[in-house]
Amino acid sequence: MPGSADDALLVAVDPLDGAQRHFAVDDRPVDNVTNSSGGGLQAHDYWNNETEFVGGLADLLEDQPQR
């Protein structure tokens, strides 16, 4: 949502020229308890949730322009 406080959450800064680029926040529900390995704080274990989180993040990053 443009113009909201979310606009400042994820900003990439180009190390070469200092240009800033905003990344929109897109909240999506995930079930880490069902889709990640057990132990610790499983409900907060996004990195082992390959079904809902890791694959989607990989797709998002793959779509970014490369330098």
Image: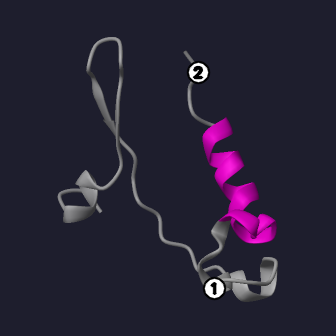
Residue 49: in magenta span: yes
- Residue, x 76% and y 56% (percent of image)? 55
The magenta stretch is 47-62
What is the quadrant of residue 3 in the picture?
A: bottom left
User: In which quadrant will I find the C terminus?
Assistant: top right
- Above-or-below relation of 59 to 20: below
Horizontally, residue 14 falls left or right of residue 5, namely: right
User: In which quadrant will I find the N terminus?
Assistant: bottom left
Predominant SS along the magenta part: helix
Residue farthest toward the top in the current orientation of the protein: 16
Q: Which residue is mark 2?
A: 66
Q: Nearer the viewer, residue 3 or 57?
A: 57
- Residue, x 68% and y 63% (percent of image)? 47
Residue farthest toward the front in the current orientation of the protein: 40
Q: Which residue is mark 1?
A: 43
Residue type at mark 1: give it.
Answer: Ala
Question: How many residues crowd mark 2 within 10 Å: few (<14), some (14–19), many (20+)?
Answer: few
Task: Mark yes or no: residue 47 visible.
Answer: yes
- Residue, x 69% and y 81% (percent of image)? 32
Mark 2 → mark 1, Cα distance in angstroms = 33 Å
